[in-house]
Amino acid sequence: MRKPAFALAFVLALALASTALVAQPAMTQSPATGLRRGGGRPMTFNDMMAMKRLGSTAVSPDGRWLAYSVTTVNLDQNTKTAQIYIQPIGSGDAKPPTALTFTQPGDSDPQFAPDGHHILFLSARTGSQQAWIADFDTATGQLSHPRKITNLDTGVDNAIWSPDSASIAFTSFVYPDCPPLAPGDNGVPANCNYQKDTARAQDPVKAQIFTHLFFRHWDHWTGPKRSHLFLVSVAAHDVRDLTPHAVNDVPPFSLEGGGCGCAFSPDSREIAYTLKDVPVPAISTNADIFTLDISRALTPTLNPAPLPAPVKVSTSPGGDFSPAYSPDGKYLAWRSQARSGYESDKFRLVLYDRATKTIKDLMPTFDNWVDEFAWAPDSKSIYFVSGRQGAEPIFQVSQNGQSVAVLNLSDDQDFGDLHVLSDAKTILASGMTVQSPPEVIKFENDQADFINRNTVTAEGIRKGFFPLLLSKKSQLTHLNDSILAKLEMPELEPFLFLAQDKTMLEGFIVKPPHFDPAKKYPVKFLIHGGPQGAWDQSWSYRWNPELFAASGYVVVMINPRGSTGYGQAIIDGVNGDWGGKPFTDLMTGLDYAEQHFPFIDKSRECALGASYGGYMANWILGHTQRFRCIVTHDGMFNPESAYGSTDELWFNQWEFRGKPWDYYGKPDSENPYRRWSPALSAKNFHTPTLVVHSQLDYRLDVSEGFQLFTTLQRLGVPSKMLYFPDEGHWVLKPRNSQLWWKTVNDWVDQWTQPKPTPAH
């Protein structure tokens, strides 16, 4: 386990822990290497593809049963297929559960009905994805009589139960200019949406006319359809469009996920949802929370009465997401950002009092993001997860915000998908590390009521001191035990270092399997994206440190300015300074690793990055010759051209402090678009570079990769380009992923491995 100096302070302080890096001892090297499982072989790409991938999870109302979806990859067929599993919660089962016989490949997203007698799931077993339910036997855990309750040609996604188990809310992409779906439309294909889809598919002319921005987003052309929120009666199967007049998506796209971005009130008579109700979504981050009285939609009728107008309850000019009602119905909580136009502003946890219609920041002195939260059933507290120094622990805050505690801080894992059981003290969550994919973990709190314990001051919370909430922990699922048992998976080892301005920052290394401290190893220097992201205990199938290390490399990762989990000031440190402090932070962190880990061969290092990491790889290309090679994936090369070809303009406008033409006529030193442009340092390009870019990447258009590759070729710099015509910002298809890993690793090997001596 991870035991740097600041982690040892947790043990010494017993109940108090500090997140303030500046309060910690001077830089120290991590203890000797520990291995998750010793004596095995290095992981291969095929091992990683053979691992089962945990999907969404659900817990039965009585707390006895766990349902979850599991995705299996078939590399030969180039497919990923989900299926539903159910198992008793108990104290953990050493054997992987067996999928129930009714489930079919493609069934996913199970949810128990609040009445405990049914399960909701999504399935495309009869064509397009629809909402299905099945009867559930609470005594045996068996499911029976699966049946489809929606039949929309536009498909169904993000389905959730109402608390009374009588209705289901879901989203579907429809044409806003079509008449709203209403009772009688479910199951009738010859409607406006079907006719428009058919006409578009049959029209040989595929040209489009744009009259607004956001005509494409991330990996798809948006077209005329928009996501709307619907309600379907479980008994009558009648469908009602709850947002018929929305011209923007409900919910808006979010990298943090969040499903439908909606929630039912405990009495099932109101629904809260997220909508970006702005005229130009491409330049705004202002998503708001709306509530809608759906009482009139609960009684099926052929002539439904109009619904009342939705009520906007959020007031922040920034983004508001993830609404959730307290079980007692008194409050509505959500994640809120204060600053307009900044997608990486601090995600606060706010509470809306439904009686007084007032909003308060529940933890104004808490300095990290609230990434996900779940109410305790007694409404007295909220559990949430927050990134913290290379991990994502679980916290608990009282409903009044006066008490905050952290759960099992010594657990170096990333947690998410929280479920708080009816006793308000047992929590289920998915947990992962760099060494193991997500599994379901069960926590049982030892304290009877943490809220009554002594707490620290607001100043202490601001600095990161929290009471430590101890919990008994057990693992419920074991999806990949048989594979992991065969592998040697080195741990993620942290180290602290001082940046040039004396800010304390953190880095990590992963040693190669079968590590020999007497040897010298080449380095893969990984640079994270975002830029507001972080290296932590996340398992990844795309940028996996264990797989990078498996071929005999030391992997070095630095969390520079812009990284999450170290307070908002560190996050904000990248704004308007893309090639400034973040670059020197990375180089200083690598300097520290070279000086303190003698097994690093600093003459054989390769820098690799994607997204912002790709931008930084491009910046490195023109500002240092210390690397033997570079891999740049979907990186920004020319910020001025990137502004005109991206989809989410708010990002570029925030990070580069305005629009390009705001700086016309000013010197480059005053123009962030040119001051931080890798393209303007092209004359300094000498390092062999692999460029990776994808046609469907609309965040950073493929033209950025083409410009860089053209420049490298014209300069005579050894270079290669890997181009994917069918991928977006991420390489997701299994066979494409296989090619990506082989091409990237071969490139690094080519430039860092000793050349064979010619035979005489």
Image: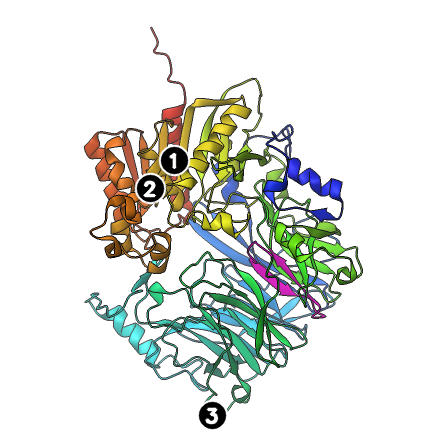
The x, y position of residue 391, in whole percent, is 59, 46
Q: CA distance from mark 2 to mark 1?
A: 9 Å
Contact? badges 2 and 1 (CB < 8 Å): yes
The x, y position of residue 280, in whole percent, is 33, 69
Front residue (pair 326, 125): 326
Q: CA distance from mark 3 to mark 2?
A: 54 Å
Amino acid tagged 2: Val
SS class, disc 1: helix
Instruction: Say which mark, if any, is on residue 744.
Output: 1
- The residue that label 3 is drawn on is 305
Instruction: Say which mark, if any, is on residue 336.
Output: none
SS class, disc 3: loop
Residue placed at 28% from the left, 57% from the top?
659
Amino acid tagged 3: Ala
> Dot 1: within a 10 Å radius of its alpha carbon, few (fewer than 14), some, or many (20 or more) residues?
many
Front residue (pair 697, 172): 697
Front residue (pair 258, 4): 4
| Magenta stretch bounds | 366-385
Instruction: Say which mark, if any, is on residue 692.
Output: 2
Amino acid tagged 1: Val
**662 is within the stretch colored magenta:** no
- For residue 354, side relative to residue 672 (left or right): right
Q: How is the image coloured?
A: rainbow
> Dot 2: within a 10 Å radius of its alpha carbon, few (fewer than 14), some, or many (20 or more) residues?
many
